[in-house]
Image: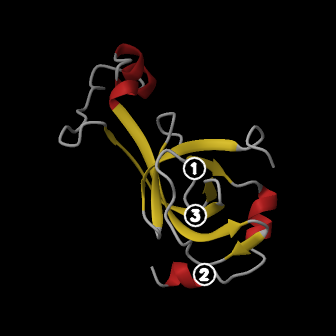
Amino acid sequence: MNTAEMQRVGEVVEASTTDFVAQCYELYQSPPLGSLVKTRDLAMELYGIVYNATTTSFEPGRRPIARGKDETTEEAIYQTSPQLLKLLKSEFSALVVGHRQGDKLHHYLPPKPARIHGFVYLCSPEEVKEFSQSFDFLNILINT
């Protein structure tokens, strides 16, 4: 499957060999918990299972404040304060459960972490089916 057909859901902003955090391009558009996602570099693809999603302020010490007291809908809050879409971010975390090097799919941790700014894609149903042919990755989930 080429990248034009894949659904891009975010970009890696933090990475280790065991997990990565991706920032979504659109507020509140994190993939569902349990989704299989992937990111790639020149040599391999890393597969992860989404285990956490957050929406927070871009500024670490600055929490959002309630703004809807005089509004009738949540959408009205964003209409009267459109800057909120630029002040908040949605992120998700994925536990790395495998990787592909060449044509070989491995259900264990990769030799190196995902690349910062690597694009993250939602895996297609065909990729999920292929990845779940082996349950060796469950060991990673159980030991987490």
Q: Position of residue 12 (x, y in %)?
A: 48, 49
In the figure, 11 relative to 67: above or below? below
In what element is the residue under mark 3? Answer: strand
> Type of residue at label 2?
Leu
In the image, 46 versus 23, the foreground residue is 46
In the figure, 52 relative to 59: above or below? below
Say the numbered circle drawn on residue 139: none
What is the spatial separation of the Cα atoms under label 3 and label 2, in whole angstroms?
A: 12 Å
The tally of labels here is: 3
Instruction: Tell me if 65 is positioned left or right of 20 in this view.
Output: left
Q: Which residue is mark 1?
A: 31
Q: Please name which of the two marks, 3 or 2, marks the residue nearer to the observer.
A: 3
> Type of residue at label 1?
Pro
Residues at circles 1 and 2 in contact by the CB criterion of under 8 Å: no
The residue located at (38%, 17%) in the rendering is: 82
In the picture, the quarter occupied by the C terminus is: bottom left
Q: Which residue is mark 3?
A: 48
Q: Please name which of the two marks, 3 or 1, marks the residue nearer to the observer.
A: 3
> Type of residue at label 3?
Gly
What is the spatial separation of the Cα atoms under label 3 and label 1, in whole angstroms?
A: 12 Å
Q: Which residue is mark 2?
A: 138
Q: Earlier in the sequence, mark 1 or mark 2?
A: 1
In what element is the residue under mark 1? Answer: loop
The residue located at (73%, 42%) in the rendering is: 3
Q: Residues within 10 Å of mark 1 (few under 14, many from 20)?
A: many
Q: Position of residue 103 (x, y in %)?
A: 79, 67
Q: Position of residue 119 (x, y in %)?
A: 58, 45
